[in-house]
Image (cartoon, rainbow, N blue to C red):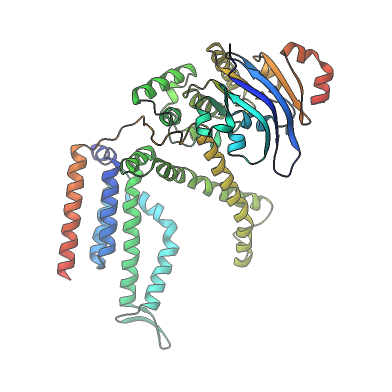
């Protein structure tokens, strides 16, 4: 099966700073979850921005190497064009949710993709049913809990049906119940054939991952199966102390 | 309840026309009684839309200092008629100055209160209304974001002031000069934070394919109904009629 995402020798440095990560390489196939782990400040979120084309298009810096999304180099596309194939959910939902009603948040992406009205309504119903938020559709995103907000942000991206989902520490500020619910949805998405990059600093939340990429000190320490990573005590000690 | 529904369900374009006509009339007329009539008419419309006079005046309260300043300036620099307060040879308050000041204030009140009529439409319906008026959707969404983020800016200022107060600065008790210095300290962080939030939101919008195409579709639909056409026609006719009567009667 051809890969959804191919990262080739990807390096990035913010202006005037050293490379945050260098020569990152990996592929991601449909129905596969890649966990990305590393200590704070190691460049996980920056990598997430690069996978969705926000780097180099909207964030300044020196990017080397290529990110190929569904075979297309993200350098040659605009961020809105990339968004039709890759969706990102950020750690902080505050700036991601800007519309007065959850229903409008979910409709925003499909509207931008010019889907017909009936199709938008159908997609909203389908995704709201999957994430169990039908009862929240008329609510204001600012008046719900943090866990629900993160689910709304995820649902809003899912409504665009991207082949690749990048989830940047979306469960890091949530309680156990909300985290379990989000992980359940991620499992369903994998079963539906979505390629998922799941970034987290907590290894326990990455139990769904098929492979794990360990970042730290500006380089990739390991890319392998979760069991191998977890059994490599020296590696974990080196990366996380 | 039915009267609330009538105003709320009006198409935002109808409300925009009402606002434009009322605001235009308030600029054209200079007579205080006419302006008072227009202001009361705006209040009546708002009342029908579920925004009662108490709510309107509580929102207008923040303009009180501005109104007082306008009244003082008009009275001082445009004196006319009988002097009501004289200091030395200077007529500080005159009857004509007061009337002119009241006229300016009523004009401002009418424009602000008529614009409040737009609050009776949901923000998304307002955006749709603007788009139907051939305003590019990027600009219409900018208006929506401004509505969304203005209260956030207010919250940021309040948070910054609270943080300063928690460090032992009693803002209400310090002299004006120091107060201004405190405000200059919080000005930059608040502006920078607002700009960062705006940038993050812009990136988040693009990451959901905003501006991927020159056109976009919409989940909600706006259609001008019979009552919209009727109110639009009545507004235009009444507006033109009142304007003519006022100008001929001068």
Residue A26 location (% of width, % of height): 68, 20
Where residue A119 sits: x, y (%)?
Answer: 37, 22
User: Foreground: B209 or B146?
Assistant: B209
x, y (%) of residue B138? 43, 42
Q: Residue at x 74, y 36 (%)?
A: A19
Residue A232 figure quarter: top right
Question: In the displayed structure, does residue B165 sit left or right of residue B2?
Answer: right
Q: Quadrant of the C terminus of chain A?
A: top right
Q: Tell me which corner region of the image, top left, top right, bottom left or bottom right, holds residue B139.
A: top left
Name the residue rendered at 52%, 24% in the picture: A85
Residue B35's image quarter? bottom left
Question: Across the whole image, how many numbered discs are drawn on residues?
Answer: 0
Q: Residue at coordinates 33% horizontally, 57% vertically from top-left?
A: B111
| B215 w.r.t. B169: above or below | above
In the rendered view, would you say A14 is above or below A177?
below
Question: Is any part of residue A168 visible from this angle?
Answer: no
Along the viewing direction, whichever of A65 and A100 lies nearer the viewer: A65
**Residue depicted at 36% across the width and 77% down the height:** B78
Specify the quadrant that holds the N terminus of chain A. Answer: top right
Query: B70 left or right of B202?
Result: left
Foreground pick, A136 / B130? B130
x and y, in percent, of residue B45 in the image: 26, 49
- Depth check, front residue: A227 or A12: A12
Is residue A124 visible in the rendered structure shown here? Answer: yes
């Amino acid at each position: 099966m051809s890969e959804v995402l191919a990262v080739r020798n990807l390096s990035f440095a913010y202006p005037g700073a050293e490379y945050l990560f260098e020569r990152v390489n990996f592929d991601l196939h449909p129905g596969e979850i890649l966990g990305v782990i590393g200590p704070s400040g190691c460049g996980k979120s920056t990598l997430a921005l690069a996978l969705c084309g926000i780097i180099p298009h909207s964030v300044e810096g020196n990017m080397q190497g290529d990110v190929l999304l569904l075979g297309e180099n993200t350098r040659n596309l605009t961020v809105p064009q990339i968004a039709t194939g890759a969706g990102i959910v950020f750690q902080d939902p505050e700036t991601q949710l800007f519309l007065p009603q959850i229903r409008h948040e979910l409709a925003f992406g499909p509207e931008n993709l010019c889907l017909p009205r009936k199709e938008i309504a159908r997609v909203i119903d389908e995704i709201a049913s999957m994430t169990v938020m039908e009862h929240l559709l008329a609510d204001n995103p600012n008046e719900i809990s943090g866990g629900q907000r993160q689910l709304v942000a995820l649902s809003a991206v899912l409504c665009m049906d991207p082949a690749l989902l990048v989830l940047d520490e979306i469960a890091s500020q949530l309680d156990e119940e909300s985290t379990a619910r989000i992980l359940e949805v991620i499992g369903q998405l994998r079963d539906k054939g979505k390629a998922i990059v799941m970034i987290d600093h907590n290894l326990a939340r990455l139990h769904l991952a098929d492979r794990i990429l360990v970042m730290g000190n500006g380089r990739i320490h390991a890319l392998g199966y979760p069991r191998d990573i977890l059994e490599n005590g020296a590696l974990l000690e080196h990366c996380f102390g | 309840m039915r009267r609330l529904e009538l105003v709320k369900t009006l198409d935002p374009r109808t409300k925009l026309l009402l606002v434009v006509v009322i605001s235009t009339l308030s600029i054209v007329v200079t007579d205080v009684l006419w302006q008072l009539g227009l202001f009361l008419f705006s209040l009546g419309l708002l009342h029908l839309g579920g925004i009662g006079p108490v709510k309107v005046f509580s929102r207008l309260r923040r303009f009180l200092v501005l109104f007082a300043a306008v009244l003082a300036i008009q009275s001082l620099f445009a004196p006319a008629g009988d002097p009501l307060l004289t200091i030395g040879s200077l007529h500080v308050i005159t009857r004509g100055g007061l009337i002119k000041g009241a006229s300016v204030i009523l004009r401002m009140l009418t424009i602000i209160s008529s614009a409040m009529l737009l609050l009776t439409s949901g923000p998304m319906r307002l955006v749709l209304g603007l788009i139907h008026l051939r305003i590019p959707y990027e600009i219409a969404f900018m208006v929506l974001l401004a509505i969304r983020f203005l209260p956030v800016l207010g919250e940021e200022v309040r948070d910054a002031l609270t943080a300063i107060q928690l460090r032992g600065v009693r803002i209400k008790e310090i002299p004006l000069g120091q107060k201004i210095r405190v405000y200059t300290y919080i000005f930059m962080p608040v502006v920078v934070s607002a700009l960062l939030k705006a940038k993050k939101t812009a990136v988040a919008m693009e990451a959901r394919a905003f501006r991927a195409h020159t056109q976009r579709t919409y989940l909600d639909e706006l259609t001008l109904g019979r009552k919209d056409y009727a109110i639009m026609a009545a507004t235009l006719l009444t507006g033109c009629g009142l304007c003519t009567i006022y100008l001929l009667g001068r």
